[in-house]
Image: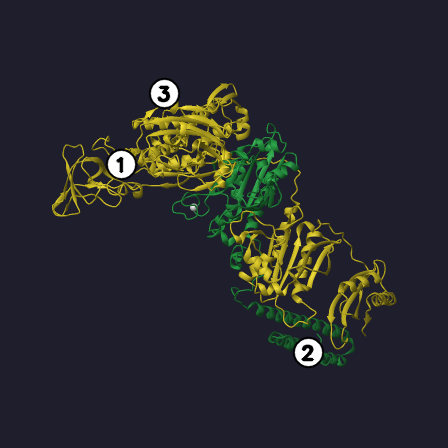
Amino acid sequence: MSALQPQLDDVAQRLRAGANAVNDIAALEELRVRFLGRSGEVTLVRRGIGALPPAERPDAGKLINDAVAKMEAVLEEAKARIARGALDEELERRIDVTFPAPEAALGSIHPVRRIIEEISEAFGELGFATVLGAEVEPSYYTFDALNIPADHPAREGFDSFFITPELLLRPHTSPMQIRTMQAHRPPVAILAPGRCFRRDAVDARHLFQFHQVEGLLVAEGMHFGHLKGALAYLSRTLFGPEQRVRFRPSYFPFTEPSAEVDTTCPKCKGNGESCSMCGGSGWIEIGGAGMVHPNVLREVGYDPAVVSGWAFGVGVERIALARYEIDDIRRLIESDTDFLRQLQ
Amino acid sequence: MRLPLAWLRTYVDLPDEVDAIADRLSMLGFPVESIERKPSITGVVVGRITAIEKHPNADRLQVCTIDIGSGKPLTIATAATNVAAGQTIPVAQIGAILPHITIAPRKMRGVESEGMLCSAEELALPAEWFEDGIMQLDESLPLGSDVVAAFGLCEPILEVEITSNRADAMSVLGIARELAAAYGTALRAPSFENPGSAPTPAERMPQIELRSQDCTRFVAQRVEGVRVAPAPSAMRIRLAQAGQRPIDALVDISNYVMLEIGQPLHFYDADAIPHAHLIVRDAAPGERLTTIDERALELDERALVIADENGVQGLAGIKGGSASEVRASTTSLLIEGATFVGARIRRTSARFALRTEASSRHERTLPPALADAGVARAAQLLASLGAQLFAPVVTGGAIAPAAQIALASSELARLLGIEASSDSIAFHLRALGCEVNVDGEKLSVRPPWWRRDLTQSVDLIEEYARLEGYDRIPESLPCVPATTVSSARYRREREAAHLLEALGYREVLTYSLVGESLLGALAQGGLDERARSVEVANPLSEEQRYLRASLEAGLLAYLARRDERATIFEIGHTFARGENAILETPMLAFARAIDTVEQPEWQEEGFARVKSDTLAILARLTGRTVTVASGEDRFLHPGICASLSIDGHPIGVVGRVHPYLAQSFALARPIYLAALAFDAIPEYVAPTYVPPSKYPATYRDLALVLAPEIEAAAVERVAREAVGAECVGVRVFDEYRGAQVGPDKKSLAVRITMQSPNETFTDAAIDERIGAAIARLHDELGATVRR
Ligand SMILES: [Zn+2]
């Protein structure tokens, strides 16, 4: 055994003790310099090699190198321990995650548009295109082509704003039925959302402008059951999977059979009772629908013996009132920022 | 239409409570808008005052002895002043329950009173339509019989909406027919036999002349020996329940028939019509009519009138005239029951704003046979009052029976999606009064005379579905075939909305119809929009007289009224007067206020923000390069306004709101605004990918001194052209004005980036290109380089 061994053991033991004791990188570096530096303790030991018998010198060199390697490993280990300690300290930090964050600078689309988009997307999945039309329409598209000739009593129901006797603000989106069917051979499957106008005095339930979404499907083999299915689908899209629809017979000159369409009141879930939204009936009215009248199909050059079709028109504002439980329809127009923020 | 359930029950047995009946009506296509429920009343019987004397202790009370048929007369004290011996009156016995009181024995000033005599109000009838004091009943009513049951006083009244196609349903009988068909119960329709058969003496014979095709039938009947007196109690009460004020027996009978079967009638005082000669004709221009409610009308040839030899006696199907109306002295009547072309009546009624019960029925075009039925019913009722009838005189062609309609059960199945046997179809159609012949799957159907709305097979299919119940048709989703219709316009609008949402804008809706308050504010800001605005012919108010000519005005008003700090957009149509047409333009506009601190006068940070929003949207929507140049717009500051174009086509503008307008709208903050025309935005083109060069890009920055009016875009264009194809970027990134460049000059800092796909640029190659750029900038724009 080399005479240097006890010295090396002593140095290594003191280095280990020192390394275990330090807690920061600077002190560890000091330790390294003191033991392994150019004039450190190991260098002193290495100087002792000269005093050894020549036969022992090569082994002694190896002995020191091995010891240095072990000591460096000890220092590395200490270094790793100190670094981890710093991370562990970071891990001790706690912040109040409930502290309010600034609001993101995202804007919003209007609830009316959101409803139109949801309907458009749902029917898009079925294969319906969405088309847009003009708000000022000739009476031909608004009435005549829709089986409402001049002096038809139903014209009064569409209490319309006229620009000239032949030109008016559309009171419904149905002109898009005619425009689409005249431009395309059957089959056609469209949604036509848009702004409509009627001479209603403004109050909490009425506006003189509102949005409708028109739906039209004309193809071979279309029937009333499909129309009911389509409106149930629409209603479930907007209000949830439990939704039911009710069709009540009605009269529109451009459809037959015609129906008013009700859906389960979303507030009371159809229970009625003393529900303020549906007046206790358990139903809210969302629009009108029916099988396209054969006179309308003939007008656009379709053969009612070959194709059949159905159409519906739903009131978007009315849906918005029910869906968001809005107390006054006027809030939808020139809405204040708080309203837009709540319904974003 | 008000529909007393009690009246309805006289024609049809209704095996349901009122709510279920209302539901049934709704599901037949007659929505019940409200149900007027009556308070509970019991213990009221018919009584007769057999004796009456003054109360011994009270001047204002009378003590009546009342026979209620029980053999034991009642003593009842009353404060009413209209009582007299012999009257038949409603008596509330001890224990009776009236709307506000329960009748108990009580002493009235020492006299034991065994009940109460009732007024109309106490029987839940409108007090103002009946006698002051105690209600008078017909003598013929059995004493002791139940008044409440006899007149259905506790039965509810339905308010029913009748769609405009159902001329037949504007009556109690019409609704009774529907309910009988729906419930499968028998209908007890009144007889339409006219009891008048005696020939009218020649000099009193009605002579009716139809000079207009718009009168389809005119039934006239002479009735004599009539007397103006109150109608029987039952009729008065029914009319009141139906919302019609009882007047006298004659007026009441004509109203009763109209409400009962739907045929409006007019009763002329026969002595006021010379030679009983009536003419249905167009009015002459300038002719005048004073209506029975004393309205003076000036007519022209558009109005259809009933005239006699002296002039107009009534506005056909709408209102009679005062000259020949029934008055207290009337003893002979000329009854008119006529039918007209509905459109003619509707136009006239709308023009004179005269909406009457009669016109609301006639404008739906009544079936000619109803005229005969109506006159017959009136004749029956007049006869029951003792009038002397002559035979009715009918003018107008023979009534053609309704045409046969062919219907195949397969056609019904094709449209409804349910199979139905010919027999089940025939069952429902017969219930509605149709004659039906069944031949296998083919049906031949003749609608009843009152259903002239049934003309083609689809009408019958609807009738079947209505009676079968729409709820019996199962829901199913159709398999939608591929079509050729494109959603491109909608998708682009949608994408624009979502881009703006992502940029922080909130969508608002403003009014499409605008008026003085908005146009006035614009005018005050120097912008007169009236000349370009499209006017509505029949606005609801001055505030809605014009179609909006811009979205911008609405956004400014929103910011001014709602929230000046809001960041908003709207997508909508604007309208302008064109040469021969209305120009309708789908637009997108957005606005935001941006406060800026301390900026040099040649810079506008807010403008830069909104401009970058605009360019980002257009880049995403089109995939193309947008050209920005200084522009002009009526809403924008002339020096802070850019026009935007793609491939030379203008798309819109962006800028700061004109200060006059901002002041007029009291907007304190600087507002920046952009407006884009959707249809001008070209369609999207997909960009082509350019792989990165293997060679590094190099740039040089130049500080140029130029005249202040030289635009950055010009500098960029010239530099790009000079450097050539290897120029991958030119961007002006700073502007300076002031002492260091001297007056009337500005300095622009521009970075020119170059890159070659084939080689690394040497310094010499870069210097050569930059030198070329500097030379061109000097030659074309007078720019010098600041060292
Ligand atoms: Zn409800």
Number of marks: 3
Q: Position of residue B748 (x, y in %)?
A: 76, 69
For chain B, what colour was chosen?
yellow
Tell me the residue at 14%/48% (across/down): B58
For chain A, what colour was chosen?
green
Q: Quadrant of the N terminus of chain B?
A: top left
Question: Which residue position holds label 2?
Answer: A35
Assign a secondary structure to mark 1.
helix
Residue situated in front as seen by the camera: A221 or A199: A199
Q: Amino acid at mark 3?
A: Ser
> In this rendering, which labeled residue sits more in front, label 1 or label 2?
1
Between the residue at mark 1 and the residue at mark 2, the CA separation in whole angstroms equals: 120 Å
Tell me the subunit letter for badge 2: A
Residue extending furthest top?
A: B439
Pointer 1 or 3: first along the chain: 1
Assign a secondary structure to mark 2.
helix
Asked whether the viewer can see residue A263, the reply is: yes
The image quadrant that residue A84 belongs to is bottom right
Question: Which residue position holds label 1?
Answer: B148
The crowding category of the residue bearing disc 3, from other C-alpha atoms within 10 Å (few below 14, some 14 to 19, many at least 20), is few
Assign a secondary structure to mark 3.
loop
Q: Position of residue A289 (x, y in %)?
A: 52, 38
Residue situated in front as seen by the camera: B693 or B313: B313
